[in-house]
Image (cartoon, helix red, strand yellow):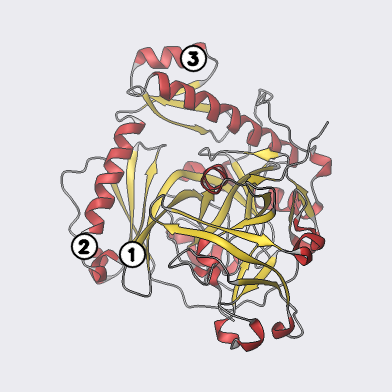
Amino acid sequence: MRNTGALRVAVVCSTAFLLVGTFSAPASAEPDSGVDQSAADQLPRELAEAVERDLKISPQEYLDRAARAQELSTYATDFRANRPTDFAGAWIGPDGQAVVAVTSQDAAHAVAQDGYDSAQAPVSADGLERSLTDLNNWISTLPREVASQVNGTSIDVLDNQIVIDIANSPIGSALNLPTLLANLKVILSPGGPKPTDPTPMGGDTYVTTAGPIKDTPPTDISVCSFGFNATSGSGESVNLSAGHCNPNAATGVGGAPVYLPNPANVHDSTQIGTFAKSSLGSPSALDWSVISLNANGTSSGLDKPTVRGANGSTVTITGTASPVVGAPVCKSGQSSSFTCGVVAADRVETQLFMDDGTSRTVRGFASTACTLAGDSGGAIVTGTLALGITSGSNSGGAPDCTEANLTLAQFGGTASLGIPIDQVAAETGATVRTASLD
């Protein structure tokens, strides 16, 4: 079977500040985000172990920093709306504190009065986004053999610059970058990994085909992971996953069947629904799909506000969240189970090349969590809040995360591309299922 979840995305996590080993000092203030999250002792053991292993912090600090990031997100949105030329970004620092970057001393004073740390930056967030747009427009004019060497572009709010990730190849190294673009940092990454085919597991893994699975050769059966359970605008049970998992991803039309895999005989798998629709790239540059569930799907547990992770453990989703640089995240996917990291960039763009020779821009956020082939479409959480859907990674071809971490350490470590769930919900009209803690 082939892994539709093997989109290769080279997302740069270039700032040493964000490496998980730096998260050690406790935060001094308790978060007051107004968002309900589960208690630390209610997290499944597998997730708590992943947090301690990957983030080097306690489960309670994981929840606290996730809540603090959402408080910062709300403040930053309002501050940017009121002072667009002064706002240059926001993040959670290595000590767990909230930081707002500004371009003037007056703005720094205002931020301090509101109780936040500040950092000076020369370029506003609006200016960085304009530069990113200019860079991506230039890349879109390049011949395919040249543009294919650009793994992705992103905004590094910590260093107040644009980052372009280029394949470490003769063409990539010789790429003549625009000289008019200021604050540009170039990263060279290894070439494409060799494809692998990890065996799908139960729980949140699904397989899909263009037609009936009984008539489909094993090489044409694709593997992905379920994302968040939700309800459609008309109240039907659906699951939100990655758009590139849809066999009809090129057109976005629905109809392709989705199955819970039978490990003993994949051709005897149980159909639990069909793709209703999907989007990959234009016009919004998102990568999402809506899976309409049938009775088998809802009875399997896909009508509950939970994310199924390693060994059948579950995390109850208590709300939704927006990506904030430095916020802790954990992703669920049966290829690599629970793995954790931090948000490395809240806006990343990469070119996806289609079989017909065209390319599409996919936009999302970057995290340092390890993601393997087959994890695509899976859920990304911060605390117990739904944050995004896994779209791709630079470690998709690795057999396991241990090898991925060793191989990619010299290139900045593992990195994954997530699609913000709030943007997916807004575009699809779906509502993520959540549980009240009252």
Mark with earlier residue (3, 2): 3
Of residues 122 and 302, which is closer to you in this image? 302
Q: Is residue 77 shown above or below 256?
A: above
Q: In the rendered view, tell whether residue 272 sits above or below residue 366.
A: below
The mark closer to the camera, 2 or 1, is 1
Q: Circle 1 sits in a helix, a strand or a loop, which is it? A: strand
Q: Earlier in the sequence, mark 3 or mark 1?
A: 3
Q: Residues within 10 Å of mark 1 (few under 14, many from 20)?
A: some
Screen quadrant of the N terminus? bottom right
What residue is shown with label 3?
112
Looking at the image, residue 15 lies above or below residue 253:
above
Disc 3 from disc 1: Cα separation: 44 Å
Query: Which badge, 2 or 1, comes first in the chain's sequence?
Result: 2
Quadrant showing the C terminus: top right
Q: Tell me the residue that label 1 is attached to.
A: 359
Q: Position of residue 275 (x, y in %)?
A: 59, 65
Identified at 51% across, 69% down, the residue is: 6
Front residue of 235/101: it is 235
Contact between labelled residues 1 and 2, with CB atoms less than 8 Å apart: no
**Residue 369 in view, yes or no:** yes
Q: Of all residues shown, which one is farthest toward the front?
A: 234
The tag on residue 90 is none
Q: Nearer the viewer, residue 25 or 338?
A: 338
Disc 1 residue type?
Ser
- Give the structural element (helix, strand or loop) at label 2: loop
Q: Nearer the viewer, residue 188 or 253?
A: 253
Q: Which residue is mark 2?
A: 142
For disc 3, the neighbor class at 10 Å (few under 14, some 14 to 19, many from 20) is some
> Badge 2 local density, few (<14 within 10 Å), some, or many (20+)?
few
